[in-house]
């Protein structure tokens, strides 16, 4: 019988909480310490994480030297999908706040996604994605955000800024003309779609399966920056 085996715990900076990495049979699972929010990530179910990169990267892959930003490394599947979709002249910057998550992806967990941190096109920064957005005006052709459980599924209230009007305006400023913002969420949210429009994006809401072609669906907003 499979059981959860705790492998490591990683503190979340300035939060007081921690993430826990478990082995579960042949899979890995990440949970919040104390069990709040259930499973945050499972290495067996990453179809929507793949789509978070595939959908926007296909739109900008033909641009000369495309540069993209991923907010949240997670289990590395979004990064791996971005690298697979983009050409050899691309650069993929990953902002991850929790140092332990980066180390997990360099170790045994990284094998599940094919060790994308080893790709020469990858640059990982141990920082809050909000700081990277502010520091890089017109720096990216695409931005992919997988922070927490989405606009209405926050397990940490500090993450709410990214989904606010101020956060979306920061994303717009960090995008190049006709840049694409992709946002992952565990559930749909009409109010967030309207918020994207007010921030200057033309957005569509896409439903994708978490694993295979049945079962749980997640939401991805694909939003193109208007003008420019």
Image (cartoon, rainbow, N blue to C red):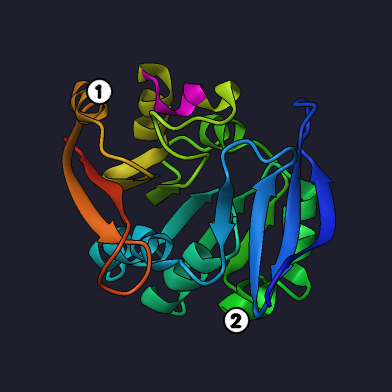
Please tell me whether residue 162 belongs to the stretch shown in magenta: yes
- Quarter of the image holding residue 207? bottom left
Q: With respect to residue 102, does 110 lie above or below? A: below
Which residue is found at the position 49% from the left and 23% from the top? Answer: 160
134 left or right of 174 in image:
right
Residue bearing mark 1: 195
* Residue 185 screen position, x and y as percent: 37, 43
Question: Is residue 118 visible to the viewer in this orientation of the structure?
Answer: no
- Residue 171's disc is none
Marks 1 and 2 sit apart, C-alpha to C-alpha, by: 36 Å
Sequence-wise first label, 1 or 2: 2
Q: With respect to residue 118, does 216 lie above or below? A: above
Please tell me whether residue 196 belongs to the stretch shown in magenta: no
- Quarter of the image holding residue 186? top left
Question: Is residue 59 visible to the viewer in this orientation of the structure?
Answer: yes
* Residue 10 screen position, x and y as percent: 81, 47
- Which one is nearer the viewer's eye here, 201 or 108? 108
Crowding at dot 2, Cα within 10 Å, few <14 / some 14-19 / many 20+, comes out as some
Which residue is found at the position 83% from the left and 50% from the top? Answer: 9
Residue interval drawn in magenta: 160-164
21 left or right of 70 in image:
right
Residue bearing mark 2: 114
Figure disc tally: 2
- Quarter of the image holding residue 203? top left
* Residue 109 screen position, x and y as percent: 70, 71
98 left or right of 177 in image:
right
- Which one is nearer the viewer's eye here, 4 or 91? 4
The residue tagged with tag 1: helix, strand or loop?
Answer: helix
- Which one is nearer the viewer's eye here, 173 or 12? 12
Which SS type dominates the magenta stretch?
helix
């Amino acid at each position: 019988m499979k059981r959860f085996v705790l492998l490591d715990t990683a503190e979340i900076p300035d939060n007081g909480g921690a993430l826990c990495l478990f082995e579960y049979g042949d899979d890995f699972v990440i949970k919040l310490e104390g069990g709040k929010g259930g499973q945050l990530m499972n290495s067996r179910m990453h179809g929507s994480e793949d789509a978070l990169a595939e959908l926007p990267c296909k739109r900008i892959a033909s641009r000369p030297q495309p540069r993209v930003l991923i907010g949240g490394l997670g289990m590395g599947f979004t990064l791996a999908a971005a690298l697979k979709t983009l050409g050899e002249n691309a650069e993929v910057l990953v902002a991850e706040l929790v140092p332990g998550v980066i180390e997990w992806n360099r170790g045994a967990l990284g094998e599940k996604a094919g060790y994308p941190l080893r790709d020469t096109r990858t640059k990982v920064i141990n920082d809050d994605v909000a700081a990277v957005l502010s520091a890089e005006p017109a720096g990216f052709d695409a931005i992919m955000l997988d922070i927490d459980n989405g606009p209405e599924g926050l397990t940490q209230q500090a993450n709410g800024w990214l989904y606010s009007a101020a956060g979306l305006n920061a994303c717009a400023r960090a995008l190049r003309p006709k840049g694409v913002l992709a946002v992952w969420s565990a559930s749909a949210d009409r109010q967030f779609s309207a918020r994207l429009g007010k921030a200057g994006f033309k957005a569509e809401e896409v439903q994708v399966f978490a694993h295979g072609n049945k079962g749980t669906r997640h939401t991805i907003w694909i939003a193109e920056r208007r003008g420019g």
